Image (cartoon, helix red, strand yellow):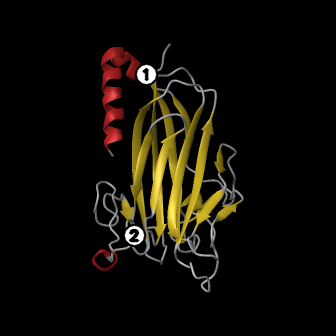
Amino acid sequence: MFLRFQIRAFLIGLAITAGPSAQSRAVEVYREDFNAEVGTNFPEWTSSEITYQNAATPPGSGTLPPAPVAISESPQGGRRFLGEFGGPKIGTAADPGYNRTAVVQTIRLTLGDLPPHQALRLSFDLYVLKSWDGDSPQYGPDRLRLSVSNGPTLLDASFSNNHKVEREGSYQDFPKPRSLPQTEARSTDTLGYDFFGDAIYHFEFDFPHDKPHLELDFTSNLFEGKGTNDESWGIDNVVIETVGTQR
């Protein structure tokens, strides 16, 4: 998490150099709460190929085509969000490598024609759904990484909804190593997912950026390979605005 403090330090210096007037000229360039109809797609959001890796065969290792990126709705409360992500079920319970497959998927947000700026501010909600196991030696790691293409990594952490920490070592390293499951979640078990529940985290990041084109990569690396019925995630309430906009 040290990198986030470096980014903040950069922006403090930017504010001192540019003066308060530059801070007051922030421009919102993107906002989406994903409250359209379930199944709605957004062209600015795309999925990578899904890769999986297992030392045993089957299932072995390989790639799968990009998955659809669309709106889902929570079982409870009718919360709509972008997801569910995490990859399909890999193999069957009869495979020698069952429950031991690492599955990686990247969801990318691409924006163009941004106004002149020196930095950007991103805020969003992360939905961690079902049986994320954090850094469990048996069932993890389950991690999410957020990075700017050709720029900084804003978040790289494990998350857990598995409270069996004494037996399964399912701590998460957000906000720091060996944190208890769901530490600093804005809400827990409000979305209606029965299998180990759910947690919503709110994040806000400021980062240096001065190009007219932006790519943000949300990458999950989940273990077990039992598909989104076992572990999944989503994104909601995304807002991006400029910092230090030039007249």
Q: Residue at x 62, y 39 (%)?
A: 110
Query: Residue 67 appears at what percent x and percent y?
Result: 68, 59
Of all residues shown, which one is farthest toward the bottom?
Answer: 94
Density class for disc 1 (Cα within 10 Å; few <14, some 14-19, many ≥20) is many
Query: Residue 210 appears at what percent x and percent y?
Result: 51, 24
- Give amino acid for label 1: Gly
Element class at badge 2? loop
Near-viewer residue (80 or 198): 198
Q: Residue at x 56, y 59 (%)?
A: 104
Residue topped by disc 2: 161
- Give amino acid for label 2: Asn
Element class at badge 1? loop
Going by the image, does 166 lie left or right of 95? left
Density class for disc 2 (Cα within 10 Å; few <14, some 14-19, many ≥20) is many
103 over 230 or under it: above or below? above
Of all residues shown, which one is farthest toward the top?
Answer: 247
Near-viewer residue (227 or 90): 90
Cα–Cα span, label 1 and label 2: 38 Å
Residue topped by disc 1: 244
Q: Mark 1 and 2 residues: CB-CB less than 8 Å, in contact?
A: no
Going from N to C along the chain, the mark reached first, 1 or 2, is 2
Going by the image, does 79 lie left or right of 15? right
63 over 41 or under it: above or below? below
